[in-house]
Image (cartoon, coloured by chain):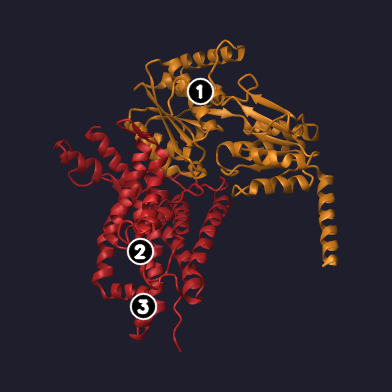
Chain colours: A red, B orange
Amino acid sequence: MDLNTIIQVLDSSIRLSTPLLLACLAGLFSERAGIFDIGLEGKMLIAAFFSAAITFTSGNVWLGLLAGIGASLALSAIHGLASITFRGNQLISGVALNFLASGLTVLIAQNWFKQGGRTPTIPEEQRFQEITLPFADALRDIPLLGPIYSDLLSGHSALAYIAFAMVPLTWWVLFRTRFGLRLRAVGEAPDAVDTAGVSVVGLRFAAVAICGVLCGVAGAYLATSLQAGFVKEMTAGRGYIALAALIFAKWRPWYALIACLLFGFLQAVALRFQNIDLGGIVIPVQAMEALPYILTVVILAGFVGKAIPPRAGGEPYVKER
Amino acid sequence: MTFMKTILGTAAALALSAGAALADPALIYDLGGKFDKSFNEAAFGGAERWAQETGGTYKDIEIQSEAQREQALRRFAEAGFNPVVTTGFAIAGSIDAVAADYPDTKFVTIDGWVDPDKHSNVVSILFSEHEGSYLVGMMAGMASESNTVGFIGGMDIPLIRKFACGYAQGVVAANPDAKVVSNMTGTTPAAWNDPVKGSELARAQISQGADVIYAAAGGTGIGVLQTAAKENILSIGVDSNQNHMHPGQVLTSMLKRVDVAVFDSMTAGADLETGTVKVFGLAEEGVGYALDENNAPLVSDEMKAAVDAAREQIIAGDLKVHDYSSDDSCPVLKF
C-alpha cells in the first residue's frame, strides 16, 4: 500500500466523518442538557432536502444552507415543545420526527419538482466549492508533508472546515463559559439549576436549538457539498451512527472527534477494500461495516471504561411545588 | 358485540364485492420506491402507458417496510384486483405464502421466482440481466483507455452479482487486458438509497484507475453517475435509460424493460397465462443497451458493430454468457 492510497482513504474518511461529526456534536449539546435526541437522522434529512431545494431554486448555496438550518430548527422546536414544554417522552418524540421527515421530504419534493421525491441536480458551480488551502499547490512536492497538506487537508468544502472548527468551539462553550456550565448542570441536576434561579426550560430550548443548527449544517453538507441534490432517505442511517459515536465518545467533544474520525475511517476502508486479506485470514467487508456498532456495544457493556450518560437525561423536568 | 360483528361483516362484504366488480390490475413497488429513476420507475412507466392506451385504471402502492409486502398482496387480492403485479425479488416469499389463499387472483412477480408447479396462479418474469450487462461490458471494455473499469452494485444479492458477472465477461471479451474492479454498496436495503456512499465508491474506483463505471445500484447510482461526470470519466446507467442525467458523460444504460413486462401483464389482464416462468432476454428485447442523442458521440461505429454482432450471436445461441445465479459463481470475477 503506497502513500497515495493511504491519503485517498484518509481523504475519504474526512468526507464521511464530517456529517457524523456535525450530527454527533448536535447530539452532544442536546443530550448534555438532558434531552435525548433520536431525531438527528430526521433533522439531517429535512435539512438535506430544503438546502438542496432552495439552492436549486435560488441558485445560492448559502441561502440553501440557511433554509436547511431553518427546516432542522423547526423540527427541533417541535421536539422541544413535545419533550420540554409538554414533558412528553423524548425518545418517542424523536422517532416520530424521523418518520415525519422521511415522509415530508418526499411529499414536498414530489409536489415541487415532480421528479419522484428527488430534487433536480444542482449545477456544479452552485454547489459548495472545494476550498484549496493557501500554498496547497506549491507545497505538493515536499515529500510526505506535501501530499498530506495539499491532498488530504486541502480541497474540502467550507462546511467540512466549519465542522472541524466546531470541536474546539464546542469544548470551549461547554467547559469554559457560564452558559456551558449551566447547560451541563441542567443535564445533571436541573433542580439545582432551578434553585439557583436559572431557567431550566430556557437552557434546554437553547441546547435543542443549537442541536438543530448543527444538524442543519450536516444535512446541507450531504446534499449540497458531497452530492448535487436530494435523494429520498439519503442520510442512510448516519444520524444513528452519530448517536453511536456520541456514546462511544462518552459525551465529550474531543472524544467525539476521534470517534467520528474512526467510524468514518472504518467506512472508508470498507469502501476502498472489499475484503481485507491479513496473511491468510480474510476479513469480509461486512465485518468492517458492522464494526462501529460492535464497538459501541462493547463500550456500553462497560468493557472499555464506562459510558455514563448525563444523569437527568431523558427525564422531563417538573418543578417542585 | 355480535351486532357489531354483523355490521362490520356486512361492511367488509360490501367493500369486497364492490372491489371485485372492478377487476383492475394492481401494482406493488419494491422498497426502492416508485420514483427511483430506475427499476421501479420503469414499472410505473409501463403501468402509465397501459392506462393511457387502454383508458383503464390501476391501483399501486409503495411499500415502506418488509412487513407490508404480504399485507399489500392480501389487501389487493381481497379487494378483487386482478392481476396483482409486483416488482423486486424480495416479494417472492410473500407471494409463495399468499397465492394459495386466493386461487382466483393472478400474481405476477418481476425479478422474483415462485415455483410454477406449486402455484398455478403465479407467473414469474425474469430478465437475462447478464446478457444485457455483457453488451454494456463490451462497450466499457472498448471505451476504457486505462484498461480498468469499475462495477458498483447496490445491495449484495445474487441478482446484482448476476449483473456484475455478465458485465465482467463482456469487458474481458472486448478487451482481454482489462481489469474489473467490483464493489457492493452494502448488505441492507439502505444500500439502494445512499448516493454519498456511491460517490465515495466511485472515487475509490477512480483512484484504482477505473475510467468507466457501471452502476447497478438504484438511487445510490445517482451519486456514482454524478461523481463520474465530475471527475470526467464515463459511467453506465441501469434499468431505465439514464443517459440524459449527464449528457455526453454517460456511455450508455443497460435497459431492463420492466415497463414492457408490466404493460404486457396488465394488457393480458385476467387472461394472463400463469403457472409459468417467463424469461425476457435479448431476443424478446427485455434487456438491451440505450442509444440516444445524449450518448451518440461516445459510441463509435466500431463499438456499435461489435456489440450488435455479439447480440446476434447470443440470440442465435452461438455465444453463451455465464449466468451467476445458475451456479453461484463467476468465471471472470471474484466477489
Q: Is residue B30 above or below residue A71?
A: above
Question: Which residue bears the numbered disc 2?
Answer: A28
SS for dot 3: loop
**C-alpha distance separating marks 2 and 3:** 17 Å
What x and y, as percent, mark residue B87? 63, 38
Are the residues flagged by discs 2 and 3 in contact, CB closer than 8 Å? Answer: no
Q: Residue at x 36, y 51 (%)?
A: A295
Q: Which mark is residue A189?
A: 3
What x and y, as percent, mark residue B62? 63, 47
On the rendered structure, is B41 left or right of A4? right
Name the quadrant containing residue A205: bottom left
**In this rendering, the label closer to the viewer, 3 or 1:** 3
Q: Is residue A25 above or below residue B118?
A: below
**C-alpha distance separating marks 3 and 1:** 63 Å
SS for dot 2: helix
**What is the three-letter code of the residue carrying label 3?**
Ala
Chain containing the residue with disc 1? B
Q: Is residue B180 above or below residue B98?
A: above
On the rendered structure, is A223 left or right of B16? left
**C-alpha distance separating marks 2 and 1:** 48 Å
Q: Which residue occupies the extreme left position in the image?
A: A142
Residues at marks 2 and 3, common chain?
A: yes
